[in-house]
Image (spheres, helix red, strand yellow):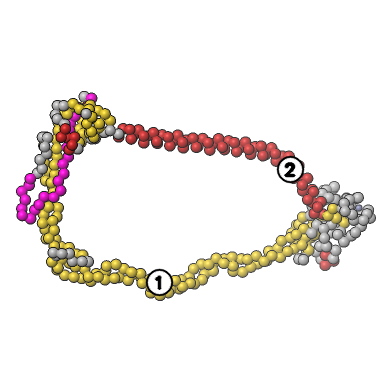
Amino acid sequence: MGKLVMGYWDCPYCSTKHIEGTSRECPSCGKPRGQEVKFYMDGVRYLSAEESRTKGKGADWLCDHCGNYNSALNTRCSSCGAERGSNDKAYFDVRKEQDAKNARSASGTGTAAGGQNSGQGGSKRGRSFGAWKIVLIGMLVIAAIIGLAAIIAMPKKRTVTVKDMSWKTSVDVEKYLLCDEDDWELPEGATLKTTKQEVHHTEQEYVGEREETYDSYEVIGSHVEYSYEDNGDGTFSEVANDVDDYGYVTRTRSVPVYRDKPIYKTKYYYTIWRWKYDRTETAEGGGKTPEYPDPQLTDKERLGEKSVEYEVTCEVKNKEKIYKVKEAIYDKLDIGETYNVKADSEEIVSIIE
Ligand SMILES: [Zn+2]
Ligand SMILES: [Zn+2]
């Protein structure tokens, strides 16, 4: 057991405060300490050897006959002389009963607070439901906008009168050129100019170990902290506890070191004849049959990719509109005729027969 520390109590009868725990009666009114008394500490005042002699031997007991507290060493009440019986409660049992009584009287006000709490909870639910509704409405609006956009973009039935038809054609011209190139392999038909050793890629190479310092959070020592236990006899026992101290310590560790090692390979520098895009020739006209440009080609030129686009100018609800069309539809249309078609905002996609 640790050292004994003086406890104090307040007299519930005459309101004298800070009475030493070694006193059994109030020095002012002479009343013995009763069941309302609760010991407390006020700083650490160690008991002298003399004071310690009869203390720390067990909690005091309350005489059921006269309400006087007695030392655990006494088998008879020092006030009325009654022998200690099974009805005589020890200090901690008395405290437990007193605390329960205090809690009950405190819970009387606690109920009202509880009611208020549940009221707040209700309004909180209402608020979160409101936020949830806003999110839902937002999502519905977005869905409606997407749906509307899809409906607008969808091809619709229209009656159109063809006013004009036109095509645009284009042809790429390619030129046969001697090109300078380099690569890791020499292609067929190439004329080698030179080769060089060049870095193809790099590999990680282990070089060795390196010491590095780092901060380590660890136990760097300890100190003693004291806690105090109520002995229930007007004293407290001091208990010493070892508590670890933590801190940062600079430590070193070994880490692997790598370097980028270049890997060399033979690179070929060469010339090679290749067909290369040179230019695009275009043509446009209004007939049913599109004509492609027919440029004059030298013996080192050839035709590449071809493309064609068709457009029809239509009258739709007294308004002029230009639609793109595919070749199959362009073939079926004639100037001056009226057709029922399906069209989106840019293209006639089909003719309704
Ligand atoms: Zn008193
Ligand atoms: Zn008694």
Q: Which residue is mark 2?
A: 106
Horizontal and vertical percent position of residue 32: 88, 52
Residue 4 circle label:
none
Asked whether 305 falls inside the magenta stretch, the response is yes
Q: Is residue 130 visible?
A: yes
Horizontal and vertical percent position of residue 135: 46, 37
Q: Dot 1, how many residues are within 10 Å of its Cα: few (below 14), some (14-19), or many (20+)?
A: few
Which element carries disc 2, helix, strand or loop?
A: helix
Position of residue 338 relative to residue 199, above or below, is above
Which element carries disc 1, helix, strand or loop?
A: strand
Q: Is residue 247 left or right of residue 298?
A: right
Horizontal and vertical percent position of residue 296: 5, 48
Residue at disc 1, CB closer than 8 Å to ligand 1: no
Kind of residue at disc 2: Ala
Asked whether 163 falls inside the magenta stretch, the response is no
Query: Residue at horizontal 39%, vertical 33%?
Result: 144
Query: Residue at horizontal 86%, vertical 59%?
Result: 72
Query: Residue at horizontal 22%, vertical 66%?
Result: 184
Q: Which residue is mark 1?
A: 257
Q: Please, what is the dominant secondary structure of the magenta stretch? A: strand
Q: Residue furthest top?
A: 318
- Residue range corresponding to the magenta coloring: 294-317
Position of residue 201 relative to residue 351, above or below, is below
Horizontal and vertical percent position of residue 157: 26, 29
Kind of residue at disc 1: Val
